[in-house]
Amino acid sequence: MSAPSSSGPPSAAGGRPSTALVRRARKVDRALAAAYPEARCELDFADAFELLVVTVLSAQTTDRRVNTTRPTLFAAYPDAPAMAAADRAHLEQILGPLGFFRAKTESLLKLSAALVADHDGEVPPRLEDLVKLPGVGRKTANVVLGNAFDVPGITVDTHFGRLARRLGWTEETDPVKVEHAVGALFPKRDWTMLSHHLIWHGRRRCHAKKPACGACPVSHWCPSFGDGPTDPVAAAALVKTQGPA
């Protein structure tokens, strides 16, 4: 893993994060774990192939919509060989409700073909192999590694990046630099659940435009407290049971 950038939160000598920052970040994670004990990947899946596919499909749509489409998709094409040989028109019909269905059909056909050609139809359990697959970046790869293979990974989606900056953990905007900076604050074993905690919090309370600051379980440690309503009643009205993907 590359060293975190020298810009951003206070660091100790040698570019390492300060002890105070590490302690504060870990307190936040513990509080979020208590607030969201059910935190998990919100995409439904039965195996690594399904998780890889639904994660790719989740771009520019909601997890709920992908979960609704999933049963029909995998009943027709349960594995990479079947999906690689799929009838394009039929696959487009299944993916129609997700939007951008032609582009997503093309992505799944190329992804499945690459799995068949390069990995005997199986999803590889290594980051360096996953990111070589068509349409798979570090974010998708870390979702699959952490949730299908129990290999710790940090998933820097828009929610994670926003919260990492609001919490003062980093000033980086590049997802890879955010991943490295935040990873330096936590034991590797915590990375996957940390990702779930921040993403759940970002979807439910710490919204992009109007965070529910007055109903936030980590407001005590948040330097951005006050970006949204601090009145508990006003803030509570902003809390969602499930936010946008």
Image: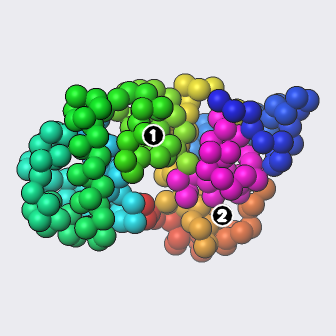
Would residue 25 be visible to someone looking at this image?
A: no
Name the residue at 63% across, 26% down. 187
Quadrant housing the N terminus: top right
Q: What's the magenta region?
A: 157-183
Label 1 amino acid?
Val
Left or right? Give the position of 8 relative to 204.
Answer: right
Q: Nearer the viewer, residue 175 or 103?
A: 103
Q: Residue furthest right?
A: 13
In percent of width and height, residue 101 lies at 25, 67
Name the residue at 31% across, 70% down. 100
In percent of width and height, residue 9 lies at 82, 46
Which disc number belongs to residue 131?
1
Name the residue at 59% across, 61% down. 206
Marks 1 & 2, CB-CB < 8 Å contact: no
Name the residue at 12% across, 52% down. 86
Say above or below: 181 vs 214. Answer: above
Q: Nearer the viewer, residue 32 or 114?
A: 114
In percent of width and height, residue 45 lies at 26, 42
Q: Nearer the viewer, residue 201 or 76?
A: 76
Q: What predominant SS class does the magenta segment belong to?
A: helix
| Secondary structure found at label 1 | loop
Quadrant housing the C terminus: bottom left
Q: Residues within 10 Å of mark 1 (few under 14, many from 20)?
A: some
Earlier residue among tags 1 and 2 = 1
Rounded to the nearest angstrom, the CA distance separating label 1 from label 2 is 36 Å
Would residue 32 be visible to someone looking at this image?
A: yes
Say above or below: 31 vs 200. Answer: above
Q: Which residue is mark 2?
A: 213
